[in-house]
Image (tube, rainbow, N blue to C red):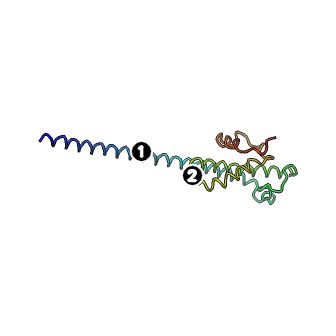
Amino acid sequence: MSSKIPVAISFTGVANFLGVVGVIGSLVFVGLELRQTQRIALAGQIQERAKMQTDRLIGYVSGNADAFRLFQMQDVSFSELSKEEKQLAIIQHEWKGTMLENNFFQFNNGLYGEEYWEQTRGRLERWYNNCDLRPNLTETSFVKSFLEYLQSLPDECAE
């Protein structure tokens, strides 16, 4: 009879151990879910702030026929623009920057696909290397991590 008691204790011990492992596994899963939910909520807040900023900026250029031409800044010499056209170009450059910063944040948090990021990265480099408008970028315009990323890009404006 004494040989049966260790087997029963051993089985109970194994069952308890597996129960504890199950509870720990469940807690880890819930923790990961909470972390993901927090990241998604934070990304939603960043997205909403970017939307408010871009809505404000685009409001300045709505209904202006020259604004579309200046949006691309292709075949346009910044130095030859009028004062109003320069202001439109600056506003639109800031608008693009806000959108690109949002994409940067979304990508770094795993919420923006690699395929889209490849396309965005090319746009970002062209935007950053618009030498006539780059002086308007300041440390108060964008978050530090985005500015650091910009400074890591190839600099076509260096003299």
Residue 104 location (% of width, % of height): 63, 48
Left or right: residue 128 compared with residue 43: right
The one of 156 and 104 positioned closer to us in this rendering: 156
Position of 45 with respect to 159 (left or right) is left
Quarter where residue 115 is shown: bottom right
- State the SS at label 1: helix
Q: Position of residue 3 (x, y in %)?
A: 15, 41
Residue at label 1? 28
Q: Residue at x 79, y 57 (%)?
A: 67
- Left or right: 35 as drawn, with respect to 67: left
Q: Residue at x 42, y 47 (%)?
A: 30
Label 2 sits on what residue type?
Answer: Leu
- Of mark 2 and mark 1, the one earlier in the sequence is 1
Q: Position of residue 132 (x, y in %)?
A: 81, 47
The quarter of the displayed image where residue 5 is located: top left
Q: Residue at x 11, y 42 (%)?
A: 1
Calculate the distance from the C-alpha at mark 2 to the C-alpha at mark 1. Answer: 22 Å
Tell me the number on the disc at residue 111: 2
Mark 2 near mark 1, Cβ–Cβ under 8 Å?
Answer: no
Q: Amino acid at mark 1?
A: Val
Q: Residue 89: image x %, image y %?
A: 79, 51
Q: Out of 59 and 112, give the one closest to the viewer.
A: 112
Q: Is residue 12 left or right of residue 128?
A: left
For the residue labelled by badge 2, is the local secondary structure a helix, a strand or a loop? loop
